[in-house]
Image (cartoon, helix red, strand yellow):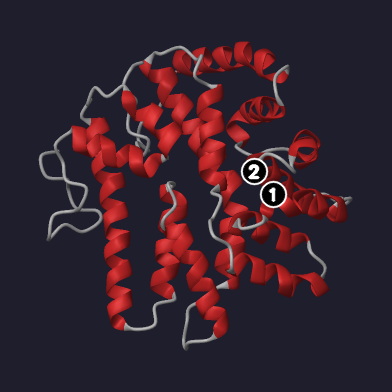
Amino acid sequence: MAPPLPIGAADWQPAASDLAAYRQAIARLLPLLETGSPAQRLAAHWLAADDRQALDPAAALAISLPGAGQDPLLAHIALISCPQLPECPRAQLLAVTEALAAGDANLQLMRLQLADPAQQSALWEAVSQAERFGDGHQLALALLLRSTEPLPATQAVQQLRLQSVTGQAAAAAMPSLRAFAQRCPVAVEVTAHVLQCRRVAALMADSPSLLTAGLGTGLMGRLALDPAQRAYWAGRYRQLQWLTQAGNAVLAAGHQDARFVQDWSQLGDRQAYANLLQRAGLPAQPPARWQPGMPIPGY
């Protein structure tokens, strides 16, 4: 596989011929996915959306609902699609996802958005007592990367592939991340609610996804109870920024690294960037005086 250009290369613009080649390759891939598993059919619908980077909620719910009791990604998609519809089968979806959502803060948070007011207190308790945050971003990203593996290995097509799937996966993740951020404003005193928010935000901060980890780390800073905690979480956030910026600098320099996309799909972009820096001879932690936005030493 050709080495990917930096994912964050906002100034990169594909040639018209490259964009046409990418769209033709996607068009050839879609019929294969549309006859596959529910997850593959979901990927096909996602890829067909292309520039919109959003799923049609009715189609997404129809594809994901039958498997929403067994597959965390299908459950996540069903739960974010249903509230967008005038006739959302709320009771059915809450029942279907009840067992799968046990212990998963992400799914419980999405179920909370569907619940009647009388159910919301118990569901928020389930969110705050969860043992993990089933990251919708990483689940979506892994599916889309797996589904697009057959695309041509030219550099431009691979860059378009990565730009497309990252945007689509981020769009899928944002409803649950936004809902949690709204429930957990800046802490001004220690309350039971603040402690519950901190527990979930700490799970998010350990996510394999840089998007979710960054939001969780930022929330932990907002919910810090003293200056020492704020400094600690500011340091954690700085390290995430170093991973992203240094990794993109390595990729922009043309670093030949065939393992990056594989790591990204299997381990998450956080570990993929850490592994990339290690192979490039850069530290996982930022230099002492480095701050986000500063140049990467050697690049």
Compared across the picture, whether 261 is left or right of 184 comes to left
Q: At 47% across and 53% down in the image, what residue appears?
A: 212
Q: CA distance from mark 1 to mark 2?
A: 7 Å
Between 237 and 191, the one nearer to me in the picture: 191
For the question of whether residue 248 can be seen, the reply is: no
Residue on which disc 1 sits: 100
Q: As shown in the figure, which amino acid type bears the numbered disc 1?
A: Leu
* On screen, residue 193 above or below 67: below
Asked if the residue at tag 2 contacts the one at tag 1, i.e. Cβ–Cβ closer than 8 Å, the answer is yes
Q: Residue 103: which quarter of the image?
A: bottom right
* On screen, residue 228 above or below 201: below
Q: In what element is the residue under mark 1? A: helix
What is the crowding at mark 2: few (fewer than 14 residues within 10 Å), some, or many (at least 20)?
A: many
Count of numbered circles in the view: 2
**Can you give x and y, in whole percent of width and height, for residue 174 in the image?**
57, 52
Compared across the picture, whether 149 is left or right of 112 comes to left
Residue on which disc 2 sits: 72
Front disc: 1 or 2: 1
Q: In what element is the residue under mark 2? A: helix
Q: At 50% across and 12% down in the image, what residue appears?
A: 21
**Can you give x and y, in whole percent of width and height, for residue 148 in the image?**
53, 21
Q: Which residue in the rendered view is the most extreme toward the bottom?
A: 189
Compared across the picture, whether 89 is left or right of 190 comes to right
What is the crowding at mark 1: few (fewer than 14 residues within 10 Å), some, or many (at least 20)?
A: some
For the question of whether residue 273 can be seen, the reply is: yes
Q: Earlier in the sequence, mark 1 or mark 2?
A: 2
Q: At 68% across and 38% down in the image, what residue appears?
A: 55
**Can you give x and y, in whole percent of width and height, for residue 163 in the image?**
46, 32
Quarter containing the C terminus: top left
